Image: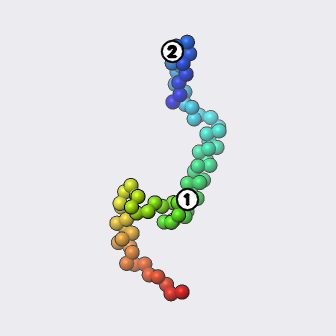
Amino acid sequence: MAFCVHKGKLTEPADAFDHPYWDYIRAKVSRKATELRQQGFSGMAMLPYSELEYGGIVAKMKKLEPKFKIRGK
């Protein structure tokens, strides 16, 4: 919400993001977020385990780790 001061009094609140420009920005950010998520468990899309805010993924990956196999070159 945004307010202005007019003659020493606050105006009615207004939605500062209710403008077509912000629709463009929201669409751009959504596209970028989708691109990052498509990178999977590497790169900028995933923090190192030590920096994750929740540990659920760490526990799941440890449980799955024995099922992964490194293929010969």
Q: Is 19 left or right of 42, judged from the image as shown? A: right
Which residue is depicted at the point 52% across and 13% down? 8
**Residue that label 1 marks:** 36
**Vertical relation: 45 (above or below) 12:** below
Between 22 and 46, the residue placed more toward the observer is 46
Q: Percent x, y for residue 36?
A: 55, 59
Q: Is mark 2 on a helix, strand or loop?
A: strand
Q: Percent x, y for residue 56?
A: 36, 61
Q: Percent x, y for residue 33?
A: 55, 54
**Residue lying furthest top:** 7
Q: Is mark 1 on a helix, strand or loop?
A: helix
Q: Quadrant of residue 26?
A: top right
Q: Indicate the amino acid at tag 1.
A: Leu
Task: Locate the C terminus by quadrant.
Answer: bottom right
Q: In which quarter of the image is residue 64?
A: bottom left
- Return the disc, 1 or 2, that comes first in the chain's sequence: 2
Which residue is depicted at the point 62% across and 49% down? 28
Q: Residue 9 carries which label?
A: 2
Q: Distance between the residues labelled 1 and 2?
A: 45 Å
Number of residues whose C-alpha sits closer than 10 Å to that of mark 1, classed few (under 14), some (14–19) or many (20 or more): some
Rendered image coloring scheme = rainbow
Which residue is depicted at the point 37% across and 65% down? 58
Q: Indicate the amino acid at tag 2.
A: Lys
Q: Is 73 left or right of 58, judged from the image as shown? A: right
